[in-house]
Image: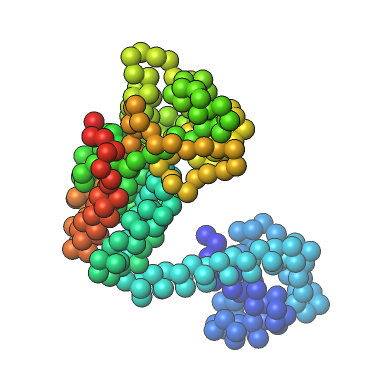
Amino acid sequence: MLTERHLEIFVALAEEEHFGDAAQRVGITQPPLSQALRRLELLLGVRLFDRERGVSLTEEGAALLPHARRALTALGELRETGSRESADGRRLRLGLPPELPPRLGATVAASPVRGGVRARVSVVTAPTATLLTDVSAGRLDLAVVRHPAVLHGLSAGPVTLLPTWLLEPDRAEAAQRDAAHLARGLPYAVRPRAESPAAHDLFLDTIAGRGRRVETVVVSDERAGLALVAAGQAVLVTADESLTADGVSRRPTTSPALPLRLRVVWDARRLAAAHAAAAAEALVGALASAHRPGAGAAR
């Protein structure tokens, strides 16, 4: 098995060009160094050094030396990161959905620390389906996800409704036309259904009303959707107040209301530590504070 010690010996001998000096550098005697070098050459299937006239790298050895140095550097960085994580103490791993507006996302992520939880916070952004899987697997401690969703035994806080806006092409005659008719004439830019199937279906069912067919176009994120709106090829529903572009108009979603439904989830079996429970409470509170009257009722 190739070990870090093998790489240290290889690099030391390449740089010292002397068995005795290389052995002293790695803190062993010359015989174990020679034995380790032979094992390394057997593992790699090449001869690394020419020993006939002193000690010099073969062509194969010279080609492999940069890789050995990079591997040693990476291992050193790995140890340093591990030591730093251990020294820093507890860590709180949070997940946020891409639909959460950036400003609110920052407030929610910072809420545990602002509430007195002593932990290093790490944050990832991922679709709801991925976040639920990661919380269940213990890769995340807490996550904000879209509602509704199949929770598979996870605990969850109350549903928060965020108001949303309809972004549509800004047409000069829009004020003299039925805005709802204008919106229905273009497809809705939506993220892939697999990211949050139940919430995706509820969104489209609410728009469809009495059995109307809703046209959609799938986009990777809201910025891509905004680009289609600006190009006059789609409309977009967003909870992000700051999302805008030239040639795009904005109005609140009413008739029907299309709030972004969110809730905090965690695995109660894993979230036993006091600081983790306090963090869950802080996230629930921060999300609830973003609720605005008139967004509608949870379904």
**In the image, what residue occupies the spot 50% across and 29% down?**
175
223 left or right of 159 in image: right
Most foreground residue, 246 or 98: 246
Q: Position of residue 38 (x, y in %)?
A: 63, 67
Most foreground residue, 29 or 198: 198
Look at the image and tell me whether residue 146 can be seen: no
Q: Position of residue 293 (x, y in %)?
A: 25, 43
5 left or right of 156 in image: right
**In the image, what residue occupies the spot 43% across and 15% down?**
213
User: How are the colours assigned in the image?
Assistant: rainbow
Q: Position of residue 208 (x, y in %)?
A: 37, 19
26 left or right of 129 in image: right
Instruction: Specify the quadrant that holds the C terminus.
Output: top left
The furthest residue to the front? 176
Q: Is residue 56 above or below residue 249?
A: below
Q: Is residue 77 above or below residue 287?
A: below
Res 40 quadrant in image = bottom right
Q: Is residue 55 above or below residue 296?
A: below
